[in-house]
Image (spheres, grey):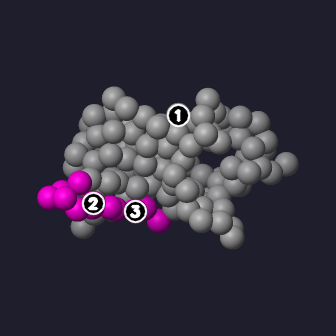
Amino acid sequence: QVQLVESGGGLVQPGGSLRLSCAGSGINLSSYAMNWYRQAPGKERELVAGIAATGGTTNYADSVKARFAISRDNAKRTVYLQMNSLKPEDTAVYYCNARRLIMGSQLHYWGQGTQVTVSS
């Protein structure tokens, strides 16, 4: 059974930092591109950051560039999202996503999400 488990969310003041982790089990994460999405109340889920299976390529939403950093440790089956200079608008549930193209079809796995609240 594939599981992605996020951790590291919480309440932080504006300007603060958090590091989210996503631990995978029952899945060879090194074969998957990994992404962090977020969903704020009343808004659609949006892609925040992504990293290639090999870790060589990353991409970020414009709203988080230069503040967030995605990384992965395939040996530990874990993906991270370092979030710095947090803003109230970063408040959302953050989801880990594993994605792989198999025989022309996209295969996705999702975590259950972790709440990040940025507030003074």
**Residue 103 locus on image (x, y percent):** 14, 58
Q: Please tell me the numbered disc located at residue 39.
A: none
Q: Which residue is mark 2?
A: 106
Q: Which residue is mark 1?
A: 69
Callout 1 environment at 10 Å: few (<14), some (14 to 19), or many (20+)? Answer: many
Q: Which residue is mark 3?
A: 110
**Residue 94 locus on image (x, y percent):** 55, 56
Q: Earlier in the sequence, mark 2 or mark 1?
A: 1
Q: Residue at x 71, y 41 (%)?
A: 86
Query: Which mark lies nearer to you, 2 or 1?
Result: 2
Q: Residue furthest left?
A: 103
Q: Are marks 2 and 3 in contact (CB under 8 Å)?
A: no
In the image, residue 115 above or below residue 15: below
Q: Look at the image and say whether residue 103 sits in the magenta stretch.
A: yes
Q: Residue furthest right?
A: 120
**Residue 7 locus on image (x, y percent):** 51, 52
The amino acid beneath tag 2 is Gln
Q: Secondary structure at mark 2?
A: strand
> Is 113 placed left or right of 24 in the picture?
right
The amino acid beneath tag 1 is Ala
Q: Which residues are magenta?
A: 101-112
Q: Look at the image and say whether residue 114 sits in the magenta stretch.
A: no
